[in-house]
């Protein structure tokens, strides 16, 4: 990721939860976002199939109230930091059995942003004193998200 992208992610995590992240954290973060997007898309695909459709619509994605609120928070932060274009590049659309409707695909960067806000806040819930998440903090956060998404 370009230096400008790393700087924006550092600013984002500071703004979202007063966290300091570094270049090594960006790889963990990218893996997290891609795994969780894939998990959401798999559930969306199952919902579309259950409803007899061959394309995944936005309403098929299991977006919870909390994640929706984090997406709204991301949109506010995004206006200052301009991170969405970077998220478009790191948010891979994984191969699925069904296609995504264009509007569903267009939502992925904002969903990734909402997941990012949720992740940043999870670090503070796990340990309110955290300033620079350690490897163990990342692993705990991932375990929590794996339980819920």
Image (tube, helix red, strand yellow):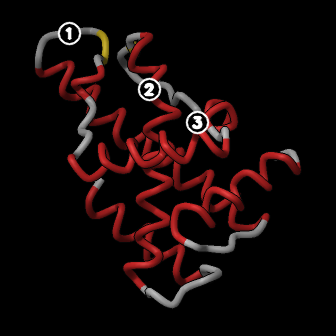
Comparing labels 1 and 3, the label whose residue is closer to the camera: 3
Q: In this view, does 17 lie above or below 64?
A: below
Q: In this view, does 36 lie above or below 135?
A: above
Earlier in the chain: of badge 2 and badge 3, it is 3
Q: Is mark 2 on a helix, strand or loop?
A: helix
Q: Is 61 located above or below residue 136 in the figure?
A: above
- The structure residue drawn at horizontal position 50% and vertical position 75%, both measured from the top left corner, is 139
Q: Where is residue 110 in the image (x, y as percent from the top left)?
A: 47, 35
Distance CA(mark 1)–CA(mark 2): 19 Å
Category of crowding for the residue at label 3, using alpha-carbon neighbours closer than 10 angstroms: few (below 14), some (14–19), many (at least 20)? some
Q: Quadrant of residue 81?
A: top right
Residue tagged by mark 3? 91
- Of 107 and 92, nearer the camera is 107
Question: Closer to the N terminus: mark 1 or mark 3?
Answer: 1
Which mark is drawn over residue 53?
1
SS type, badge 3: loop
Q: Does residue 111 appear to the left or right of 55 in the view shown?
A: right
**Residue at the spot x=23%, y=26% of the render?**
60
- Nearer the observer: mark 2 or 3; the answer is 2
Question: For the residue carrying disc 2, how many other residues have a C-alpha within 10 Å: few (<14), some (14-19), or many (20+)?
Answer: few
Q: How crowded is mark 1: few (under 14 residues within 10 Å), some or many (20 or more)?
A: few
Coordinates of residue 5 in the picture (x, y in percent): 78, 46
Under tag 1, what secondary structure? loop
Give the mark, 1 or 2, whose residue is nearer the N terminus.
1
Q: Which of the two residues, 26 or 3, is positioned nearer the viewer here?
A: 3
Report the residue that reaches farthest toward the left. Answer: 51
Q: Give the residue at mark 2.
A: 107
Name the image quarter holding residue 48.
top left
Q: Nearer the viewer, residue 133 or 95?
A: 133
At which x and y percent is residue 129? Answer: 51, 90
């Amino acid at each position: 990721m370009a230096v400008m992208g790393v700087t924006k992610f550092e600013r984002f995590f500071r703004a979202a939860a007063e966290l300091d992240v570094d270049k090594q954290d960006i790889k963990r973060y990218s893996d997290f976002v891609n795994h969780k997007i894939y998990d959401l898309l798999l559930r969306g695909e199952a919902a579309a199939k259950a409803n007899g459709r061959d394309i995944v619509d936005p309403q098929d994605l299991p977006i919870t109230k909390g994640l929706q609120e984090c997406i709204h928070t991301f949109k506010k932060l995004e206006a200052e930091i301009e991170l969405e274009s970077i998220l478009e590049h790191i948010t891979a659309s994984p191969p699925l059995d069904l296609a995504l409707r264009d509007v569903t695909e267009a939502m992925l960067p904002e969903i990734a942003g909402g997941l990012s806000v949720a992740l940043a806040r999870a670090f503070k819930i796990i340990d309110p004193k955290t300033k620079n998440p350690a490897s163990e903090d990342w692993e705990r956060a991932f375990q929590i998200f794996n339980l819920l998404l």
